[in-house]
């Protein structure tokens, strides 16, 4: 009897969800774990070659009583609540009232935004676990008792086959930094190939310095943006850092073959570790001259769909990843102001949209979904934190309405003196076909 009732419930749920166009959205509140010692137990980025974690868990930024992990978790939960409204007719009526704050349209296409959270907790709330970082790691890792492979966050996201991932983070502001928000981007194969060719003497530095990607994140102190970018290209192709000259691998700094740290169809074939001994030529070569972009991951990286995701596009570079990130930031800038304006029509002050952060970030690379990776505020700027804590509902509504617009479009109201107005244009989802369903292992 119970089984029959459950079957009926599932049937009715599917009838509600799938009688309208349905899109899967993953909301990823960044971090969640703790940078705890020893790294051999609590680290991330598990490498099957050395059978060890290659880095400490990145627990995120903190300032005073505020932590990145808790602020973005609170916001992510609010976004999920608003997305869930689209699953029922009654809920969509309420969602429509939110849409009317942004658009003068009289009717709105009915869709379902099937939302998922990558985490609903943080390590402080789950102290009984022996491995406090187990629910929060990005990459796969072995169960310490059984040695069986456990899926990390990237593998979990790919298993959900999402169309869109919204990853929420905070930054610490440096001296003179006024706050605001910024996109986080990783380029496609073509840009890394330019950097590889510069390292190899086949291209001049201007090939990169004259590109829109030239404002690269400086993570190696005392190195130029070009030197940091060339090192990231070595990490992307070889798994190793480069020396400062960018001419050869620094074998003391290994980041791992990250495509093989994820459970998905683009991982190399089982036993790939045995091929490392013959590494002078091929995908595991430690030199640019010997490197060959061979295997399913590198085929994927050079495909049209990855070009669409990560290169070119409406923002001029960064592909659909850049567009969706910028568009959602514009929706927050617009929506928070519109919802919180006073009786005189005056808008609250907000920090600006900053230039993107560019490096070899994992989430935009190792998921097939279009990825909106947002540093949505600066933890040590009171104005940003006030909006994200005291007005997280208005922020969440703005993000959810922006997500809706990315799927069907939205004709925006254009109030006078509104400094930022979203474009309201949807992504060309049709050209991707079933790409979002293909990342999971066959």
Image: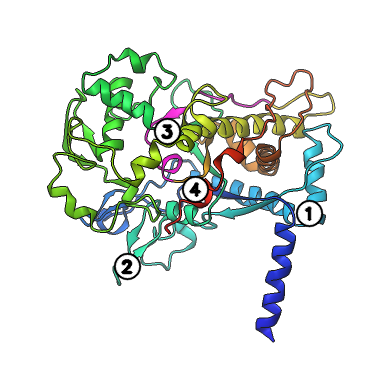
**What residue is disc 4 on?**
69
Q: Which residues are magenta?
A: 349-366
**What residue is disc 3 on?**
186
Q: Nearer the viewer, mark 4 or mark 2?
A: 2
**What residue is disc 2 on?**
148
Judge by depth and name the residue closer to the eye, 77 or 118: 118
Residue 326 in the image: state x and y as whole percent: 58, 30
For disc 4, the neighbor class at 10 Å (few under 14, some 14 to 19, many from 20) is many
**1 or 3: tag closer to the N-terminus:** 1
SS at badge 3: loop
Q: Real-space Cα distance between discs 1 and 3?
A: 36 Å
Q: Quadrant of the N terminus?
A: bottom right
Task: Look at the image and tell me whether residue 437 can be seen.
Answer: yes
Magenta highlight on residue 99: no
Q: Real-space Cα distance between discs 4 and 1?
A: 29 Å
SS at badge 1: helix
Q: Real-space Cα distance between discs 3 and 4?
A: 22 Å
**4 or 1: tag closer to the N-terminus:** 4
Question: Is the magenta region chiefly helix, strand or loop?
Answer: loop
**What residue is disc 1 on?**
91
């Amino acid at each position: 009897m119970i089984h029959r009732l459950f079957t009926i419930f599932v049937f009715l749920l599917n009838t509600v969800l799938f009688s309208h166009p349905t899109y899967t959205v993953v909301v990823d509140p960044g971090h969640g774990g703790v940078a705890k010692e020893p790294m051999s137990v609590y680290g991330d980025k598990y490498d099957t070659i050395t059978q060890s974690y290659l880095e400490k868990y990145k627990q995120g930024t903190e300032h005073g009583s505020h932590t990145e992990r808790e602020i973005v978790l609170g916001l992510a939960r609010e976004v999920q609540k608003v997305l869930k409204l689209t699953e029922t007719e009654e809920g969509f009526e309420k969602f429509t009232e939110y849409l009317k704050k942004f658009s003068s349209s009289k009717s709105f296409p009915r869709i379902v935004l099937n939302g998922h959270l990558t985490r609903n907790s943080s390590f402080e709330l789950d102290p009984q676990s022996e491995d406090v970082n187990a629910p929060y790691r990005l990459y796969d890792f072995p169960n310490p008792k059984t040695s069986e492979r456990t899926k990390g966050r990237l593998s979990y996201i790919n298993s959900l086959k999402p169309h869109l991932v919204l990853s929420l983070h905070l930054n610490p502001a440096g001296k003179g930094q006024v706050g605001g928000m910024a996109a986080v981007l990783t380029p496609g194969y073509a840009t890394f190939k330019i950097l590889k060719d510069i390292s190899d003497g086949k291209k001049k530095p201007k090939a990169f310095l004259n590109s829109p990607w030239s404002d690269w994140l400086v993570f190696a102190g005392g190195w130029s943006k070009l030197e940091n970018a060339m090192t990231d290209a070595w990490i992307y192709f070889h798994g190793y850092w480069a020396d400062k000259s960018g001419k050869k691998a620094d074998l003391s700094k290994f980041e791992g073959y990250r495509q093989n740290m994820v459970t998905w169809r683009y991982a190399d074939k089982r036993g790939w570790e045995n091929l490392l001994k013959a590494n002078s030529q091929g995908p595991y070569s430690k030199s640019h001259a010997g490197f060959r972009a061979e295997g399913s991951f590198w085929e994927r990286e050079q495909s049209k769909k990855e070009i669409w995701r990560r290169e070119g596009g409406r923002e001029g570079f960064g592909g659909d990843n850049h567009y969706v990130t910028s568009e959602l930031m514009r929706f927050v800038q617009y929506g928070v102001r519109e919802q919180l304006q006073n009786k005189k029509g005056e808008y609250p002050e907000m920090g600006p949209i900053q230039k993107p952060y560019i490096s070899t970030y994992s989430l935009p690379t190792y998921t097939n979904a279009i990825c909106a990776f947002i540093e949505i505020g600066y933890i040590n700027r009171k104005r940003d934190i006030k909006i994200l804590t005291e007005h997280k509902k208005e922020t969440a509504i703005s993000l959810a309405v922006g997500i809706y617009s990315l799927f069907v479009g939205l004709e925006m109201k254009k109030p006078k003196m509104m400094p930022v107005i979203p474009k309201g244009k949807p992504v060309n989802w049709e050209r991707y076909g079933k790409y979002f369903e293909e990342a999971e292992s066959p």
